[in-house]
Image (cartoon, rainbow, N blue to C red):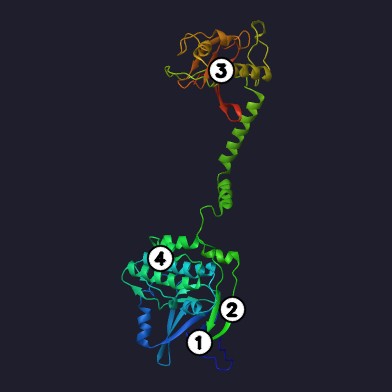
Amino acid sequence: MRSRSAGRRSKIGGYRVVERTPRGLVLVNEDGSEFAGRRLRPREAEAVRESPMARLPAHRHREAIVGIVPSRGRRVVVATPSTVATGEQLLAGERPLRLGAAITLLGPVIGAVRSAGAVGVHLAPTAADIGLTSEGRPVLLLTTPSVPSPRETRAALRRLLTEVSVRCAELPVTLLLEQGDLLALEGRLYGLADPEGIGLVRLSAGTTTTSVRRREHTRSSAARHRRRHPLDGWRSRVQDVAVRRRGPLLAAAVIMLGAVIAGVLGTPPSGRADHSRTPTTASPSRSPVSEPPATQAPFVGMPSSPGSAGRAQTPAEAEEAAHLLVEAALACSDADCRRALTTAESPLRTAADALAEHLPAGVGVGVVLADVNGSSAVVDLETAPGTTAASVLIIRTEAGWLIRDVYAGAAP
């Protein structure tokens, strides 16, 4: 247990000694932050400061030197974070280790070893080189030895996994040892289960276990060791994109809404063009062009008879005419039917007599074209006096026939 003496608290440099343990000192600065202190000979302290472990960049799961303070002919190495136990003490207990606790112990350590190897420092930790903070966070201590090559690192980790598996029967050591590199080993380890809190067994010199403290981490604190999934936070990312691109998104929404409304109300009288699913085998490819008549006022239909050229066709009549043409095209299942829907000037070189009866009376039929795939048909209608030529591209979708685009003026 921590031995705190109210009357014999001393100071080392700018730190106050609040505890003396077999592992060293527990120091507190003016801000109340705790640090670990080890009293060493000057030569030993210098060796720790020059060790490869001490020269590594800061890492959440590696102990780092804060400073070296002289004290009574010795040197006190001040490091962070402060630890209360080691992995060796944890594994020396009698209780079995749960799989989640084993992942909490091993996962961060393997990650810290892997990041050190990325900068050319190969570490070979043992259970005694793993410190545990009061919250159960594992850290590699400054005493962790370095080795010449990654081969020795992998051998040390194999020994560590085997040692932990003695206390944790759920740990699949054979599966973990099959991983080719440390990144795969770390990912496989975190894929076994969620990390969970470690029950810390704190020992004092010359005695058995003096106290046992277990801290059950909440899911949020345990999740800090979990590898980030690509879909994490997707809602916030979608919201950010929607806010940044709100202009184009609003424009797209308006266009789509207009297309749906136009499909419900029918083809506007400015023109129409239909795509049918009439299959064709081989015919010259030609761009379909249509120039059906359009009146000046919106939703004014094409004339329905020769004597009523000035009467506007209602949207319902225009929609009915469009559906008739679509039905005629969809009804084709052979070459004779396709010839009936085309004229002598079309790529299929046949007559369009059968098509005329499906169009409003008085409307002249020009050319009916079919593309090489036979998936569309465009009717070129004569432009009535007093109207402006326009072309309407109609496409077939899962929602039905929709207006894709309108071309006013010259044919595209």
Q: Is residue 95 left or right of residue 51?
A: right
Q: Nearer the viewer, residue 183 or 296?
A: 183
Within 10 Å of disc 2 (Cα), the crowding (few <14, some 14-19, many 20+) is few
Q: Nearer the viewer, residue 148 or 214?
A: 214
- Are discs 2 and 4 less than 8 Å apart at CB? no
Marks 4/3: CA distance? 66 Å
Q: Nearer the viewer, mark 2 or mark 4?
A: 2
Marks 3/2: CA distance? 80 Å
The disc placed on residue 329 is 3
Q: Earlier in the sequence, mark 1 or mark 4?
A: 1
Q: Amino acid at mark 3?
A: Ala
Q: Earlier in the sequence, mark 2 or mark 4?
A: 4
The residue indicated by pointer 1 is 21
Residue 397 visible here: yes
* Callout 1: SS: strand
Q: Nearer the viewer, mark 3 or mark 2?
A: 2
Within 10 Å of disc 4 (Cα), the crowding (few <14, some 14-19, many 20+) is many
**Which residue does the image show at 38% across and 74% down from the upper left?**
53
| In the image, residue 115 above or below residue 5 | above
Q: Earlier in the sequence, mark 1 or mark 3?
A: 1
- Are discs 1 and 2 less than 8 Å apart at CB? no
Q: Amino acid at mark 4?
A: Arg
Q: Earlier in the sequence, mark 4 or mark 3?
A: 4
